[in-house]
């Protein structure tokens, strides 16, 4: 394996010299208030093992921050990326508020009684579209799974012939109470249905909604909106860009026991592993190992197991997996806002 | 709204104590924040969730009323410690260390009506 694993640490400047050289890392912070260092070291660096011990000493009398946030950075060779079957999809362009704060409805009746994993989203995703980061086409609220793709990406995905997913329309919080247009009840809607028929698109299929929002249909769509909502309300609908939430329709993929979960890479305990077996821990510390055969034939899937814990609007989350075809499409389109990491196959998983 | 404050009492008390000890910095910091974020001057006050929602803080958690530029100042200080967009959620001990560190440097106003 040629993957290079490093860890980025946010270290309190006041105490950084207890473990790191003064010239290591770069200062972070606002003007004269810089009080943190971003230090990147190899994950195998033996100094990391001393962090819990130093923290214990510093915190003996009062709470002191030594290491704040951290993240593992993995760099793969081109060959590894080219040969991988699956990738972990992560959204790096994040915004607030969460979908639930805007009216997205979840059904928690079937969740795990211990870790609360497994809630089901039962409404379309409702977000405040005004808060979407500019210039990004794959974005998410800070809640994992509330991710969205732009119209351009949705069109490319719809045409790509890829499988294992559906794109659910995302609703803007200001217009969420407006019902969707009943296409056969307004003249322009009927015209759209007639136009869609030769393409073999059923009106209840997600591809139809993506097709309706294409530039070629703009005039008819605008007319249908005017007819159904009235011109003032329709004008507001036209101002909101179309976004779609990718949801997995394929079978969830089990995570292999070879994947290591825990609190931090330099600590042993894994207190958030659910005894019922659905949440495996707070963070994934190793590369992700899954049973790739379970994802065969799908270009998009989510894992059958979860990570994280219930806190605020967060719940334990699955990982999202995409195929090599999906990676190439995102790469060709120059999609901004996403990160991909190679997933290892462990068929025994 | 049910407010589950009890599990974070220790954190809130530590934030109050850190702010109490550093209150004398507040006026200077307000001015400095206005220089750093001039577009936010005149935007009024913002309610700041003491336990940030993106880190798993409860929606019903305590909030402090801050001038918009200073709110941005504090939000950035928190995001430097715990980066945005990693799905991170904190436990009470981690909240404690992070918020004492932040509010020792950037205190919260403790005036009547500044918290809810």
Image (cartoon, coloured by chain):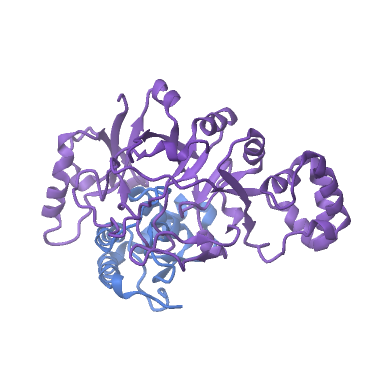
Chain colours: A purple, B blue
Residue A23 x, y percent position in the rendering:
22, 32
Q: Is residue B106 above or below residue B84?
A: below
Of the pair A288 and A335, the residue shown nearer to us: A288
Horizontal arrangement in the rendering, residue A164 relative to residue B50 (left or right): right
Q: Quadrant of residue B59?
A: bottom left
User: Could one spot residue A154 in this view of the protein?
Assistant: yes
User: Could one spot residue A18 in this view of the protein?
Assistant: no
- At horizontal 24% and vertical 35% (from top left) the residue drawn is A43
Horizontal arrangement in the rendering, residue A143 relative to residue B110 (left or right): right
Q: Quadrant of residue A17?
A: top left
Residue A100 x, y percent position in the rendering:
52, 63
Q: Is residue A24 above or below residue A36?
A: above
Residue B110 x, y percent position in the rendering:
35, 73
Residue A96 x, y percent position in the rendering:
50, 56
Q: Quadrant of residue A254?
A: top left
* Residue, far top: A79
- At horizontal 74% and vertical 58% (from top left) the residue drawn is A236
Of the pair A21 and A79, the residue shown nearer to us: A79
Q: Is residue B70 above or below residue A6?
A: below
């Amino acid at each position: 394996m040629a993957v290079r694993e490093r860890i980025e640490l946010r270290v309190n400047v006041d105490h950084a010299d207890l473990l790191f050289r003064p010239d290591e890392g770069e200062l972070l912070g606002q003007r004269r208030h810089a009080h943190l260092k971003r230090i990147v070291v190899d994950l195998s660096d033996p100094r990391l093992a001393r962090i819990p011990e130093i923290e214990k000493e510093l915190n003996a009398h009062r709470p002191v921050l030594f290491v704040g946030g951290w993240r593992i950075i993995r760099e793969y060779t081109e060959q590894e990326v080219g040969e991988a079957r699956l990738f972990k999809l992560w959204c790096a362009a994040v915004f607030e508020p969460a979908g639930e704060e805007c009216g997205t409805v979840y059904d928690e009746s079937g969740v795990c009684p211990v870790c609360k994993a497994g809630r089901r989203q039962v409404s379309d995703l409702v977000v405040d579209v005004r808060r979407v980061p500019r210039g990004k086409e794959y974005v998410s609220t800070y809640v994992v799974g509330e991710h969205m793709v732009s119209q351009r990406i949705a069109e490319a995905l719809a045409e790509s012939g890829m499988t294992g997913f559906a794109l659910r329309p995302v609703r803007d919080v200001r217009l969420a109470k407006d019902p969707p247009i009943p296409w056969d009840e307004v003249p322009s809607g009927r015209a759209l249905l007639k136009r869609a028929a030769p393409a073999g698109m059923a009106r209840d299929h997600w591809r139809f909604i993506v097709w309706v929002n294409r530039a070629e249909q703009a005039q008819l769509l605008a007319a249908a909106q005017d007819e159904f909502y009235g011109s003032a309300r329709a004008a507001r609908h036209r101002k909101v860009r179309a976004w779609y939430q990718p949801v997995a329709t394929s079978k969830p993929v089990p995570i292999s026991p070879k994947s290591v979960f825990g609190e931090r890479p330099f600590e042993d305990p894994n207190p958030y592993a659910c005894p019922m077996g659905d949440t495996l821990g707070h963070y994934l510390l190793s590369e992700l190992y899954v049973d790739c055969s379970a994802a065969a034939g799908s270009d998009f899937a989510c894992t059958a197991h979860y990570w994280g814990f219930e806190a605020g609007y967060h719940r334990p989350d699955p990982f999202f997996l995409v195929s090599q075809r999906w990676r190439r499409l995102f790469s060709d389109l120059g999609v901004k806002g996403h990160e991909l990491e190679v997933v290892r196959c462990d068929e025994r998983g | 709204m049910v407010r589950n404050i009890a599990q974070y009492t220790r954190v809130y008390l530590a934030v109050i104590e850190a702010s109490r000890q550093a209150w004398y910095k507040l006026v200077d910091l307000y001015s400095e924040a206005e220089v750093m974020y001039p577009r936010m001057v005149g935007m009024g006050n913002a309610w700041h969730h003491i336990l940030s929602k993106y880190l798993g803080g409860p929606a019903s958690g305590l909030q402090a009323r801050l001038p918009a530029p200073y709110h941005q100042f504090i939000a950035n200080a928190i995001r430097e410690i715990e980066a945005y967009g990693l799905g991170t959620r904190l436990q009470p001990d981690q909240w404690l260390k992070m918020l004492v560190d932040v509010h020792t440097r950037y205190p919260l106003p403790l005036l009547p009506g500044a918290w809810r």
